[in-house]
Image (cartoon, rainbow, N blue to C red):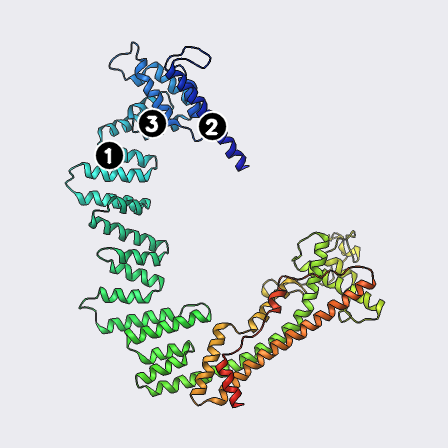
Amino acid sequence: RRDGRRDETSKVNLVCTKMREVMIHAENKGITSSGKIVKEGHFLLPILSSYAKQNPPMLEEALALIKSNAPKNLGNQSKRKSVLLSESVQSSIQYLAFLADYELIFNTAIGMYDFDLAKAVARHSQMDPKVYLPMLKRWREMPDSMARYEVDVKLKRYESALRHLVAAGRDEDQTSNAEHISKCLKFIESQGLHKLGLELFANESEFLQSIMVSLGERLLTENRAEEALTVFLATSPKCIDGGKRAASACGDWRAYFACCAEGSDSADGDDSMTSISVKIAENISSRGGNMNEQRDCYASAARILLDYGKDVGYAVDMFISGHMYNEGRRISYLHKRTDLVKKCVDAAVSYANTCIEDLAERASSFEVASKRYYEVIKIRRQAIKEAEEAGIDPHLDDSASLFSMQSTASNSSLRSTASGSSVGSTRSVASVSTVISVGATSTFSFTGDVDTMKHKSKFNKIGRDKPKKKKKKKGPAARRMKPGSEEELKSLVDTLKFSIPNDPYLVAISETVTFLMQSGKSPLAKLLFQAYEDLSSAVTKEQKSRSEKDKQDIEERGRFAHIEGRIDEFAEHDCEKDVNELECKFLPESIRNIFSFLS
């Protein structure tokens, strides 16, 4: 529809333009294409119509045409009377107002900065003379640039308004240049015209710095701290205070301490810098994110504490928190702190024990989830097939999944009975009433004793003495995943993926194994290495086993389908490819080689 309207508008504009060109050409030539003699102004009203009917309306050109035709229609008008108040001009304005709104025409007239024309337009409108006459009079008496500035503000043409405001300050010999600059700056800030302000005051360094600082403050309020930091430090001279606030907001501690050093004075002492560094380090280390991002944060916090806080112990604690035991040990030896070396070793031992337990739990979780995933994915495949046959969304909610589960179980049981196979016989078939209550449509209104459903008044005591049913609990306890649902499948897939250590975890385990080997803790390092290898083997084994069972199941379904004279089309779920590709990455080759020597 939008394209149709655009085409229609384009056609109307082309017709109006062509007609206007023909009429103007005829007036200039004095004769039409048919040979009729015409005078200038003969097609005034049709030309006004062509301007008014374009989209957007070309009212400024229409008013300019009316004004250009005015001197040629003076007649016997009084010399004291404005030519724009003549009958011919007024009739032309009234005709234009018939095609467009009076207020729009008035705003166009003042937008041309022609206040006499604006007065002529407003004369026959519904506008209050007590409002527009004093306004037009005041603008006439003002300097041109200031009058145009106020007109632009009224019409919300803010860029043009700023240009005229700047021109007004340059045209007049103002006694207070600071007052004019302050007014310009306030207008720039209120309308967000910093780019234009920098362009207009490119040669005035003092005011340019004020605009840059204002731009930085605006970016800060818009949560664009990185951009604000660059703007604050790009000013001449630099806005150190703004730079520090922006650096703190975006977490750029390097820029922050550079600003502190560049803007420091004799009043700042080592104690002040130490307290600041501790505060910033703690702020950085407390940030969230994934394991890799947290590791970087701890490394940055440790660097701050070493360089600016001179606190070796706290810095080593940060390295330990990020599982960077090698770096913690290096810093400890650098500062001759053997007590901190032992602290790093103890922390690595504790972390290794935690990892060993975690890896064992991941292996167990993967095995359990994989077995259940094998059952649920078959249910979801059947649900997809049924949904595609019914022409509905294959990833429907729990009602469809339950129906699919019952359908799969019942169909499998029937095939099992007919052929003697045990495929699908592990699940019991639900009752018909259960299937109906889940998602099917029933023609019966009640399934129980009808008498107990009758209206209960004081004269009807049927069912009144029966115990009332307890209301179902609301909240997390009431929300349980339904077997075979998409929700359960998603939960299982998440469990399977979580059981596989990600890259940052793998790096931490590798570095911990290496550190323990180098610190005289080889037995524990070997246990950690073996725990990871056990997890990798369990994942590989379970993936292979499930793949083989799935392949056998598909082949058996194909044989049954062939016997029954039909085609068994395989329906694959979106998640299967990701799950089938799950595997544990190898630990670095150097670590595996070491343990191959020591085994």
Q: Which mark is residue 109?
A: 3
Considering only order in the chain, which callout, 1 or 3, is on the residue closer to the N terminus? Answer: 3
In the rendered structure, are the residues bearing label 2 and label 3 in contact, judged by CB atoms less than 8 Å apart?
A: no
Q: Which residue is mark 2?
A: 14
- Secondary structure state at the residue bearing disc 3: helix
Q: Tell me the CA gap for discs 1 and 2.
A: 37 Å
Within-10-Å neighbours for mark 3: few <14, some 14–19, many 20+? many
Secondary element at image label 2:
helix
Q: Residue at x 33, y 30 (%)?
A: 111
Residue lying at 44% horizontally and 11% vertically, measured from the top left: 35
Amino acid type indicated by mark 3:
Ala
**What's the distance in space between the residues labelled 2 and 3, CA to CA?**
25 Å
Whole-percent x, y for residue 179 in the image:
19, 44
**Amino acid residing under circle 1:** Ser
Percent position of residue 100, x then y: 43, 25
Residue type marked 2? Leu
Q: Quadrant of residue 127?
A: top left
**Which image quarter: residue 226?**
bottom left
CA distance separating discs 3 and 1: 17 Å
- Left or right placement of residue 279 versus residue 145 in this view: right
Disc 1 residue crowd, few under 14, some 14–19, many 20+, Cα 10 Å: many
Query: Which quarter of the rendering shows the C terminus?
Result: bottom right
| Label annotation for residue 145 | 1
- Circles 1 and 2: CB distance less than 8 Å? no
In which image quadrant can residue 382 be found? bottom right
Residue 149 position, x and y percent, is: 27, 36
Q: Is residue 592 visible?
A: yes
